[in-house]
Amino acid sequence: MENQTRGEQPHKRRVRYKGTHPRKYSEKYKELDPDKYRDTIEKVIAKGSTPAGMHLSICVREILDFLQIKPGQKGLDATFGYGGHSEKMLQCLGGQGHLYALDIDPIEIVKSKKRLNDLGYGEDILTVIHENFANIDQVAEKYGPFDFLLADLGVSSMQIDNPERGFSYKNEGPLDLRLNPEAGIPASQRLKESSREELEWMFRDNSDEPYAAQIARIISLRIRKNQAIETTTQLAEAISEALSFLPEKERKDAVKKSCARVFQALRIDVNSEFEVLDDFLQKLPSVMAPGGRIAILTFHSGEDRMVKKALKEMQKAGFYSEVATDVIRPSAQECARNPRARSTKMRWAVKA
């Protein structure tokens, strides 16, 4: 009592680390401090999970084998994320040349830049820019052209796992889904402003949701009745209600898959991902040096179709000398270690 009367804060004990893999994000302080708790990190990865606050880079060997990075070259990581791919590309540069890295997320870009700076990659070899990769033409005007370029189109695990970002139906949090929470409107607001027909089109067109009509109807009905859909859990509940007509034995799995697709469709819409990707693909040849090598990782059919079509069209127009005829996929060993790699496809192109 005496301490409190003097205005001092009472001592708080740190949250107990519950088991080897706690459920709540806030309790995973060992995973969130990988430098201090390396043994814990390895145990989590060995189980086929991604440690909280981290992102396991996908297809690293395949990307580096294709890009053939040489010391002295200039490259662009168009989607910086956790910085895992950037770190490996910087190693290939061997202290000579320069890597530029872009990311739209103002929260993660600061953490990732610090992490690489702490590894010894300073401003002399690494420049990190808070910019949407749709604006690569503006970046290239100042820093290009580039000898190699990587675009990883997936959402980073740090964003997915943090409940405050609202990217996953598995965790309770605000229904946000913005890659840049400082711009645009959250997904909860998008639902309120959309008609039933718009929602149905969004779910079907963005993620091939087979129950788009049923889910759009329930969401619209709830909103008309002033039943809030402000959190990830509330949206998951609406999807579950929409699929209540399914036989019980198949309902649980169907709800899980529909939740994943609907959250994906909303994320694509809120961040204008298809429009941004189209801008990027159209500008891509103009930012590359002759012979420049491009690697692109896709994670769902919609964006992969766009990449495949754009690369082929650009090759026919003479902008690329070669493009991938078949996709490159991560190995079975990588997928076992990192299940989030399973849907990955790598496509590539070489500037003429």
Image (spheres, rainbow, N blue to C red):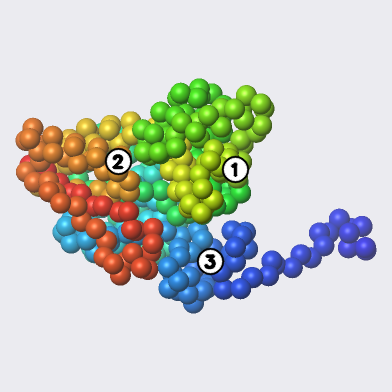
Give the percent coordinates (x, y) of residue 22. 60, 66
Q: Nearer the viewer, residue 62 or 145?
A: 62
Residue at 39%, 34% in the rendered image: 204
Label 3 sits on a secondary structure element that is loop
Total numbered circles? 3
Q: Earlier in the sequence, mark 3 or mark 2?
A: 3
| Res. 303 mark | 2
Mark 2: few/some/many CA within 10 Å (<14, 14-19, 20+): some
Residue at 50%, 35% in the rendered image: 215
Label 2 sits on a secondary structure element that is helix
Q: Earlier in the sequence, mark 1 or mark 3?
A: 3
Residue that badge 3 annotates: 31
For this view, does 292 lie left or right of residue 151? left
Residue at 50%, 22% in the rendered image: 195
Q: How far apart are the alpha carbons under marks 1 and 3?
A: 29 Å
Quadrant for residue 273, please give it.
top left
The amino acid marked with disc number 1 is Glu
Residue at 18%, 49% in the rendered image: 348
Label 1 sits on a secondary structure element that is helix
Q: Quadrant of the C terminus?
A: top left
Mark 3: few/some/many CA within 10 Å (<14, 14-19, 20+): many
From the viewer's perspective, is residue 14 above or below residue 239? below
| Res. 220 mark | none
